[in-house]
Structure formats: structure tokens, C-alpha cells
Amino acid sequence: MTVLPPLPTTPAAAATHRPSEGSVHSWDLSTGVDGPGTRFVTFLSGCPLTCLYCHNPDTWRMRAGKRTSADEVIAEARKYTRFIAASGGGATVSGGEPLLQPVFAGELLHRLKHELALHTALDTSGFPGARATDALLRHVDLVLLDIKSWDRETYRKVTGRPLQPTLDFARRLADLGKEVHLRFVLVPGLTDARENVEGVAAFAAGLGNVTRVDVLPFHKLGEGKWAALGKEFALHDTPSPTAEQLARGRAVFEARGLIAV
């Protein structure tokens, strides 16, 4: 009698039939910026975008990360589950861009949700959204989605990539009924034009699944990392937005019936 091997129990096991590993930049506990409550955040290495204001350019190259098993990440997250649960938090898979490693990201999300019973969030630019299978997204409770500009030329200037894949992914998330928190970085003289903000707001309001918009101020906290990598920080002379500019930006989203913070 032939004994069949057990069926894979996770997306990664089904895809690879071997223990899942990925390139990990770091992990940390975070409050307030990576999803609701206190969260265990895993930052994966590799990103297809080269955003002018990126505060972690050291995550762009996948080979710069440490080869890490899913077991190691889960073991680390397990240490904090009681604390996280008490705060109403969860776990976030971020980057870099986690969807450059969809099998590994899917493995983490599956195990964080079902093995550790944590609320899960996926933090993504949406550009490689086509790599996220429906199976991966089934284990995601919340998507933190960056839309960096509505104007196509500005988007390409900011990121080095086209906007359309992100919009396509956003519409797919809406069709799947996935909750989305939208992020928009307000950069004076670059993304803050009224018509640009209006475009993002109109699109977000039309999706029907965006429950929060974070209008984030541009800052230069990553400039030192750019210098350490021998890269020029092109926005060196760009100021951070004032409180009034941020309020005007949030008001545009609020006028569309969205909660903006």
C-alpha cells in the first residue's frame, strides 16, 4: 500500500514543497503607523520603486536583506502575541515591497493569521499587485495601499514606475471587498497640487472599501541613509508641509466622505 505524503497546509508549502525562506530587512514592534494598534512588523527586502522621498532606500535591493525562514519570523512574533492582542493590534508584512516575494509574504500572512490568531495587514505600493494571488489575499485583513500621485507624470517622477498597476490592484481589492487604508504623502511643490489631491480622493471614494486615508507629511528622515548609500537625495531643498497645508489636503478627502487623518 502506497502512503501518500501529507498535503501542503500553507500557500508557500503548496508552491514550493519546501520550508519557506525570504529576504528580510528587519522586524520591529510599531504603534500607529503600520496599521491599528501595536503591531509586529516584518520588513521584507526588495522594491521595484525608487521613490524620491523613500526613508528606507536600504530596503531596495533584495540581496541586501538576510535570508530568513518563516519559522524564525513566526517564532519572533509569537513572543509578543499577548501584548499585541491586548492592544487590539496585529501583524503587518511590509517592505521594501513585500509582493516582490509573494510566496514568502503569503506564508507569513497565513501563519500570522491562522497560527498566531493575529489581525493581518499587507503594506504595499500596489505596483506588483498582480503577484498577489487570491489565495494570498484571503489571509489579509487590511491592505495599507500607497497612491503616491494621481497625475501620471508626477507618479513616474516620484517612483520611476507607471501608476496604472496600482490603480488596477486597488480596483481588484475593492472587487474582493478587502478593507483598505490609503496612504498619500503630501510633498510641497510635487504632489500637493489641488487637482492631484482631488484625483486621488475621487478615485479612493469611488472604490467603496477605503475606510481611512493617511495624509502623510513629507520628511527628510531618510536623507542620511541616501548619503550612506552614495545616492543623491533629490528633495534636499524641499520643505515639509505646514500644518495648514496638511489640513487642506485632508479636507479634500473629507469632502469626498472619507475619514482622513
Image (spheres, grey):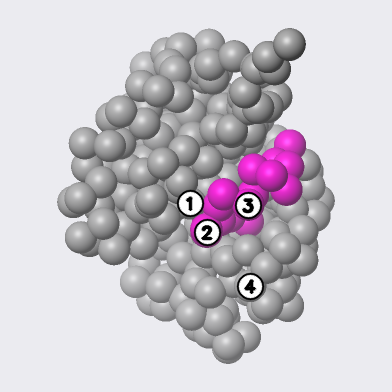
Q: Secondary structure at mark 2?
A: strand
Badges 1 and 2: C-beta atoms under 8 Å apart?
yes
What separation in Å lies between label 4 and label 1 (alpha carbons)? 15 Å
Instruction: State which tag comes first along the sequence, 3 or 1.
Output: 1
Tell me where residue 182 appears, x and y as whole percent.
Answer: 55, 63
According to the picture, the residue beneath numbered tag 1 turns out to be 121
Which residue lies at the image location 63% right of the left edge and 56% below the top edge? Answer: 147
Tell me where residue 103 appears, x and y as whole percent.
Answer: 63, 28
Tell me where residue 124 appears, x and y as whole percent.
Answer: 58, 45
Q: Secondary structure at mark 3?
A: loop
Residue 246 can be seen in this image: yes
Of tags 3 and 1, the one toward the viewer is 3
Vertical comparison of 130 with 43: above or below: below
Instruction: State which tag comes first along the sequence, 4 or 1.
Output: 1
What separation in Å lies between label 3 and label 4 (alpha carbons)? 16 Å
**Residue 155 located left or right of residue 164:** left
Badges 3 and 1: C-beta atoms under 8 Å apart?
no
* Region of the chain picked out in magenta, as a range: 131-148
According to the picture, the residue beneath numbered tag 2 turns out to be 142
Numbered mark located on residue 209 in the image: 4
Indicate the quadrant where residue 36 lies.
bottom left
Vertical comparison of 221 with 25: above or below: below
What separation in Å lies between label 1 and label 2 (alpha carbons)? 5 Å
According to the picture, the residue beneath numbered tag 3 turns out to be 138
Q: Amino acid at mark 3?
A: Arg
Q: Nearer the viewer, residue 230 or 213?
A: 213
The quarter in which the N terminus is drawn is top right
Tell me where residue 52 appears, x and y as whole percent.
Answer: 55, 38
